[in-house]
Image: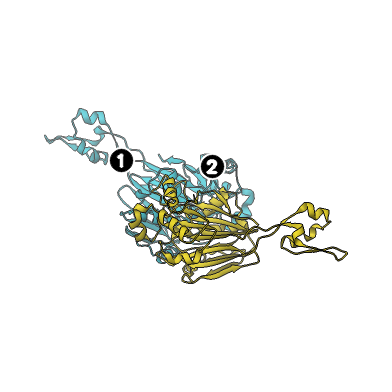
Chain colours: A cyan, B yellow
């Protein structure tokens, strides 16, 4: 079951020509989602050939401009395309007052059901759950109410042993059931055990999104043992004063969070526009947590 | 006196990778302004090396997303740069409720005086006037209250005859006065007439911005005899029904407006993303008004 994260923006508040404000595209088993939606996200989706028509769930961390100012335009463009499927937007309640004020005055009638789900930024709760994965919210610690999101696969489809299925004459109409873990019963009533028809499952994967937040150990309990941790790393550690004042994290601190949370891998982003050479931030995070990568725009991380 | 218009966006509501939503940078005699500010305008300013720190006046036509969704982000970026000079934003009153709702929830404190000037979309009035130019608003006819803007030079500086000034020993500290049309009086009390020290002035230039609007002859009285007319041309004339339904103009109609208004030149923009080949729109407008150009992004029109 594919679990992929594509980086649409890795800049903090001031974008540059090559670095856009926050946005990530998440795909889990044919569910297509966004986390945050900074200005220009709809163009970034075009650039990386991701169809906005597939998006069904949009998770917003907080209402600072670099995390939300692309959302009204994205929804308007979906509307102009006569999108029909429901779109669910999750975020702090303030987000919906901002959207409503704009959509009221721009006199927008949506062609699709647009559902707002206001989350409690102080709570940890399951906000979306289906057969394949769940999404939990948890508190981050920033200048305005801010929410982190944890995506957890619940279950991974098994990989079919096609040769074995053909040999045992299993009709392809049963393949989905078998990938889900079911045994196959022949027309003659004989049960073929699932293990004979599949390769072993991979382990379910988890992904946590932490942006924006000051370094605060309370975050760690929400993301303990996560497989992939995306964490903001706005500044180098020599700008710790600035990080504290603006309630952001340094690259070194992002590494410490990953280490303390016993994450498997760390991806850092939300870089201040003052850093042209991002390897400085990477090296600093790696000094605490070697398995760190940069959230380079256009990169798709295949989580496995 | 330089009067320049740079096209930042020429797309209608759905942007493409190469065509951005509406935005124009206007420079008149060291006054730096914007008309409309669609999503991505701050990045377009960077792309075309226009300093946002110079902007002092921003004129918004209406509150559809493709005309305003870049404005909060632009103002936030100016704020992060610790901009200090006042910024004046003009537009329909609904704009300011949208901005205020966002700035309230994002808890933004501005480092510079941000002045809102709510305009009556049904009135024609002078909204800005100084020694060099004036800006008039006028009604357009769209689905929400929409304002056109007419920029008129009041006065053009004279070009100094430097050789003559040197020959007559005019101190350079008097050059600005002479460019403004004043005579020079020597220390001995002799008056040298301005005509001896300058070349003749050029004629003051006017520029009108008409986007978005249905074809409506009432617009013509507001822009009569304008030198340069920017007019939206969202559709080809074979989509007249769609233009009427959405209250937009066809390329042919834009040409007719220019002709009836006795404009000198026409610039068309706000193109539907369905048109990859813009020369089709250009040719259609030219069939009514030969002196038509396309608003190609990054083009600076030097109005003279």
Residue B251 visible in image: yes
The residue labelled by disc 1 is A157
| Left or right of A193, for residue B65 | right
**In the rendered structure, the residue with mark 2 lies on which chain?**
A
Q: Residue at x 59, y 68 (%)?
A: B128
Residue B16 x/y as whole percent? 44, 48
Q: Nearer the viewer, mark 1 or mark 2?
A: 1
Secondary structure found at label 1: loop
Vertical relation: A154 (above or below) B157: above
**In the rendered structure, the residue with mark 1 lies on which chain?**
A
Residue B137 x/y as whole percent? 52, 67
Quick check: do tags 1 and 2 share a chain? yes
Q: Are marks 1 and 2 in contact (CB under 8 Å)?
A: no
Residue A207 visible in image: no
Mark 1: few/some/many CA within 10 Å (<14, 14-19, 20+): many
Cα distance, mark 1 to mark 2? Answer: 31 Å
Residue B201 x/y as whole percent? 67, 58
Query: Could you say which is closer to the camera, residue A66 or residue B211?
Result: B211
Mark 2: few/some/many CA within 10 Å (<14, 14-19, 20+): many
Q: Earlier in the sequence, mark 1 or mark 2?
A: 1
Disc ID at residue B282: none
The residue labelled by disc 2 is A289
Toward which corner of the image does residue A59 lie, by quadrant? Answer: bottom left
Residue B230 x/y as whole percent? 50, 57
Q: Return the residue found at the far left.
A: A188
The N terminus of chain A - image quarter: top left
Secondary structure found at label 2: loop
| Left or right of B35, for residue A136 | left
Query: Could you say which is closer to the camera, residue A1 or residue B274?
Result: B274
The C terminus of chain A - image quarter: top left
């Amino acid at each position: 079951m594919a679990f992929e994260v594509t980086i649409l923006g890795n800049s903090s508040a001031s974008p540059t020509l090559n670095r856009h404000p926050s946005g990530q595209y998440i795909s889990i088993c044919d569910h297509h989602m966004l986390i945050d939606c900074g200005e220009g996200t709809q163009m970034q989706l075009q650039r990386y050939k991701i169809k906005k028509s597939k998006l069904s769930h949009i998770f917003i961390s907080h209402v600072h401009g670099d995390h939300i100012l692309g959302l009204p335009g994205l929804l308007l463009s979906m509307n102009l395309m006569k999108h029909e499927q429901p779109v669910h937007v999750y975020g702090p309640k303030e987000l919906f007052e901002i959207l409503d004020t704009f959509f009221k005055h721009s006199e927008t009638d949506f062609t699709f059901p647009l559902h707002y789900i206001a989350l409690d930024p102080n709570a940890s709760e399951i906000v979306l759950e289906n057969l394949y994965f769940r999404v939990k919210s948890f508190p981050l610690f920033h200048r305005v109410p801010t929410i982190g999101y944890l995506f957890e696969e619940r279950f991974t489809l098994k990989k079919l042993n096609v040769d074995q299925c053909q040999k045992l004459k299993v009709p392809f109409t049963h393949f989905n059931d078998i990938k889900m873990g079911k045994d196959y019963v022949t027309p003659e009533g004989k049960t073929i055990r699932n293990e004979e028809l599949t390769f072993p499952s991979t382990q379910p994967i988890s992904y946590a999104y932490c942006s924006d937040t000051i370094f605060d150990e309370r975050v760690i309990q929400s993301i303990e043992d996560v497989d992939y941790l995306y964490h903001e790393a706005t500044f180098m550690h020599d700008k710790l004063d600035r990080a504290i004042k603006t309630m952001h994290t340094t690259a070194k601190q992002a590494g410490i969070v990953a280490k303390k949370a016993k994450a498997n891998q760390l991806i850092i982003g939300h870089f201040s526009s003052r850093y042209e050479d991002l390897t400085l931030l990477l090296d600093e995070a790696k000094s605490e947590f070697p398995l760190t990568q940069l959230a380079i725009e256009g990169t798709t991380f295949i989580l496995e």
